[in-house]
Amino acid sequence: MTEENSFTPDGPKPIIFTEHTEIRMRERSIPRAKVEAAIRDPDILMPGNEPDTIRAHKDFPDGDGIKVIYLDAPAYMLVITVARRD
């Protein structure tokens, strides 16, 4: 897993990328910066399917759209998966 800093309304929290997320980002050509932007400044934010998970959607000026599923834990945010929006 790798870690990056991000800011939330409660202050800085690390964003942790699982190995699964890293693989999906490579397979889907989704840059880390876009995943971080979707978490920090989502266009749409909704509950995920599992407890304590969040689904963030972000559309970018280049026409790219992604969705990020992450766990919002008290001390960090754990990215579970990332995909392109349909």
Image (cartoon, grey):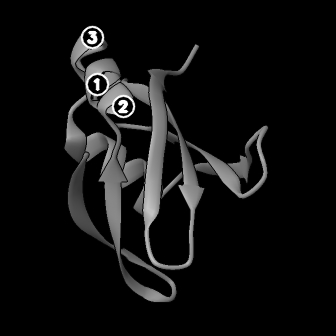
Residue placed under numbered mark 1 in the picture: 25
For residue 24, what is the image quadrant? top left
Name the residue nearer the viewer: 73 or 62: 73
Horizontal side, residue 75 vs residue 7: left or right: right
- Work out which residue is located at the far bottom of the displayed protein and give it: 10
Q: Amino acid at mark 1?
A: Met
Residue placed under numbered mark 3 in the picture: 27
Mark in the foreground, 3 or 2: 2
Residue placed under numbered mark 2 in the picture: 21
- From what the image shows, is residue 65 above or below residue 39? above
Q: Amino acid at mark 3?
A: Glu
- Badge 2 marks a residue whose secondary structure is helix
Disc 1 residue crowd, few under 14, some 14–19, many 20+, Cα 10 Å: some
Task: Please provide percent x and percent y for residue 41.
Answer: 45, 60
Name the residue nearer the viewer: 55 or 44: 55
CA gap, disc 2 and disc 1: 6 Å
- From what the image shows, is residue 34 above or below residue 39? above
- Say whether disc 3 or disc 2 marks the residue closer to the N-terminus: 2
Residue for point 79% across, 38% down: 49
Horizontal side, residue 47 vs residue 63: left or right: right
- From what the image shows, is residue 46 above or below residue 30? below
Q: Amino acid at mark 2?
A: Thr
Q: Which mark is residue 66?
A: none
CB-based contact (under 8 Å), mark 2 and mark 1: yes
CA gap, disc 1 and disc 3: 6 Å
